[in-house]
Image (cartoon, rainbow, N blue to C red):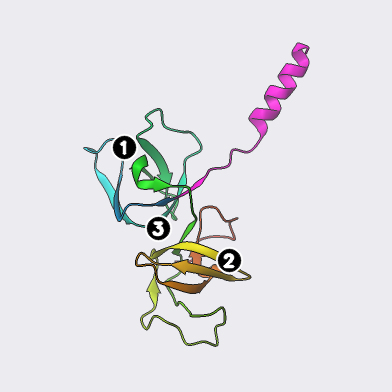
Amino acid sequence: MNSLARFAIGFLVLALPQVSKAACVQARVANLYKSPRSSAAKSWEAVIYTPLRLAKNKSKNKDWARVFDLDGKAHWIETKDLTTHFSCATVNVKSSQLFQKTNEAYVPIVNLPLVRTVSFKIVSEEAEWLNLEDALGNTYWGKKSDFWRPDAKPEGKSKH
């Protein structure tokens, strides 16, 4: 292969978009930090099923991952507290409701509206609906448009 061909292949590889990967908090509670060490200042505490977007550039330290929350703010989290084995979502509107079936005509299950950042594991999807599981294993249906998922294509600005 000549040098021009090598250059062209190298350029194409660099020009390909780097897709960041979605991850979910798998620990009951996980601390997010401002830098990759447990003695660093804490940004906040994330609960199980909190969705996060992994940074494109991996950390040199395999015990830590740089992540972004639904607002695009960067944090560091211990890798033991993350998983990429399932998808998760968090409420991304001021309030939302959960249903027993995929139809708004049904009475909502939860009496109080869910507030922004309440998170769930995604069990399945059906049209405009997400089948969701909470930390206790209960399942519900929620409208896709009310949730942020780091693995979903962006549909515009967050709604808060």
In the rendered image, the vertical position of residue 50 relative to residue 113, given as above or below: above
Circle 1: element type: loop
Side of 27 where 147 appears, left or right: right
Mark number, residue 49? 3
**Distance from the alpha carbon under mark 2 to that under mark 1:** 35 Å
Q: Earlier in the sequence, mark 2 or mark 1?
A: 1
Q: Inspect the image, locate mark 2, and give the three-letter code of the amino acid beneath it.
A: Glu
Residue that numbered label 1 is attached to: 35
Name the one closer to the observer, 126 or 7: 126
Q: Residues within 10 Å of mark 3 (few under 14, many from 20)?
A: many
Residue that numbered label 2 is attached to: 125
Instruction: Measuring from the top left, give residue 3's x and y in whole percent.
Output: 75, 12
Q: Residue at x 40, y 71 (%)?
A: 138
Q: Inspect the image, locate mark 3, and give the three-letter code of the amino acid beneath it.
A: Tyr
The boundaries of the magenta stretch are 1-23
Instruction: Measuring from the top left, give residue 31's x and y in whole percent.
Output: 28, 48
The answer to whether residue 40 is visible is yes
Dot 2 and dot 1 residues touching (CB under 8 Å):
no
The answer to whether residue 78 is visible is no
Camera-nearest label, 1 or 3: 3
Camera-nearest label, 2 or 1: 2
Circle 2: element type: strand
Q: Please say whether residue 119 is one of the residues in the magenta stretch.
A: no
Q: Residues within 10 Å of mark 2 (few under 14, many from 20)?
A: some
Q: Inspect the image, locate mark 1, and give the three-letter code of the amino acid beneath it.
A: Ser
Instruction: Measuring from the top left, give residue 26's x and y in whole percent.
Output: 37, 52
Q: Residue at x 39, y 46 (%)?
A: 82
Q: Earlier in the sequence, mark 2 or mark 3?
A: 3
Q: What residue occupies the far left of the structure in this picture? A: 39
